[in-house]
Image (tube, helix red, strand yellow):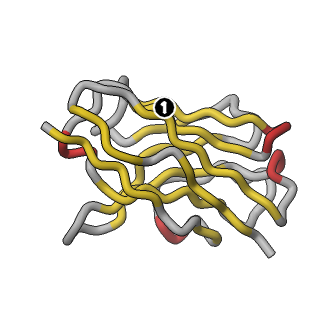
Amino acid sequence: QVQLVESGGGLVQAGGSLRVSCTSSGLTFSSYGMGWFRQAPGKERDFVAAVSWSGGSTSYADSVKGRFTISRDNAKNTVYLQMNSLKPEDTAVYYCAVPNRRGYYPGRGLYEYTYWGQGMQVTVSS
């Protein structure tokens, strides 16, 4: 059974930084690409970032490019999202997700991901 558990969320002031983590179990983590999404109140769930199984390839939503960095530690079965220069509009519930295909580098579509974490609140105050 695949499980994804996010941690590290919370309240931060605008301009600040936060690093959130997602630890997985129930799959060979090093064989799967991973993604981060977020959902603000009343809005759809949007793509934030993705990383390939090796960590060698990454992609970002335009809204976070240059401010957020996705990375992974395959020895710890964990993917990270380092968020810098946070803005109030970054406030959302953040989710990590994984597709069910080994070696697949996932993109921006929700449909590409099979397993999701429970979500974690990140609030940026102005």
Residue 123 relative to residue 49: left or right = left
- Secondary structure of the residue carrying tag 1 is strand
Q: Position of residue 112 (x, y in %)?
A: 57, 65
Residue at 59 percent across and 44 percent down: it is 21
Residue at 31 percent across and 56 percent down: it is 92
Q: Position of residue 33 (x, y in %)?
A: 69, 49
Q: Position of residue 57 (x, y in %)?
A: 63, 33
Q: Which residue is mark 1?
A: 82
Residue at 83 percent across and 66 percent down: it is 26
- Say above or below: 101 vs 114: above
Quarter holding the N terminus is: bottom right
| In front of the other: 117 or 37 | 117
Q: Give the farthest residue toward the front.
A: 11
Q: Position of residue 108 (x, y in %)?
A: 46, 54
Residue at 37 percent across and 28 percent down: it is 17
Q: Amino acid at mark 1?
A: Gln
Place residue 83 in its image quadrant: top left
